[in-house]
Image: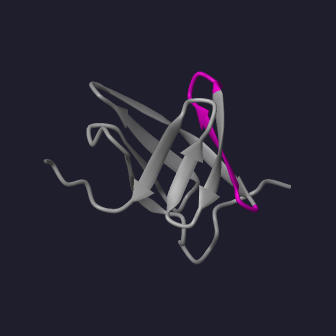
Amino acid sequence: MPVVPPLDGSTTGKYVREGNDKNYLELDSDGTFYYQKTNEGLHGQYKIRGDEITLTFADAEACKGKIKGNTLMFPTKGDAYVKGEWTKK
């Protein structure tokens, strides 16, 4: 049985990488995402199970992380993405 994003939309939205506002992740309510990495945009699907999130990119590479409040943590990459609007400094 596939795992889908919460129906209440609590995890959907834009998450900006701490320390680098050019990198962000947008989670859509249909289970797809867009990841902007400096000058490259990538698409894929995400699944949530409890407090774990798995991003699967179009090339089938997967990245696992944890959801902690309004923050997505990807420990293997050392990245944290905070939910909110992108503000250029």
Furthest toward the bottom, the residue is 8
How far across and down, in percent of the image, does residue 69 sit? 56, 67
How far across and down, in percent of the image, does residue 25 sit? 42, 46
Q: Is residue 60 magenta?
A: yes
In the rendered view, tell whether residue 73 sits above or below residue 49: above
Furthest toward the left, the residue is 89
In the rendered view, tell whether residue 37 sits above or below residue 64: above
| Side of 76 where 72 appears, left or right | left
The quarter of the picture where residue 57 lies is top right
Which residue is at the front of the view, 57 or 77? Answer: 77
| Side of 88 where 26 appears, left or right | right
Question: Please, which colouring scheme is shown?
Answer: one colour
Count of labels shown? 0
Residue at 62% in and 74% down:
7
In the rendered view, tell whether residue 54 sits above or below residue 67: above
* Magenta residue span: 50-61
Residue at 58% in and 54% down:
31
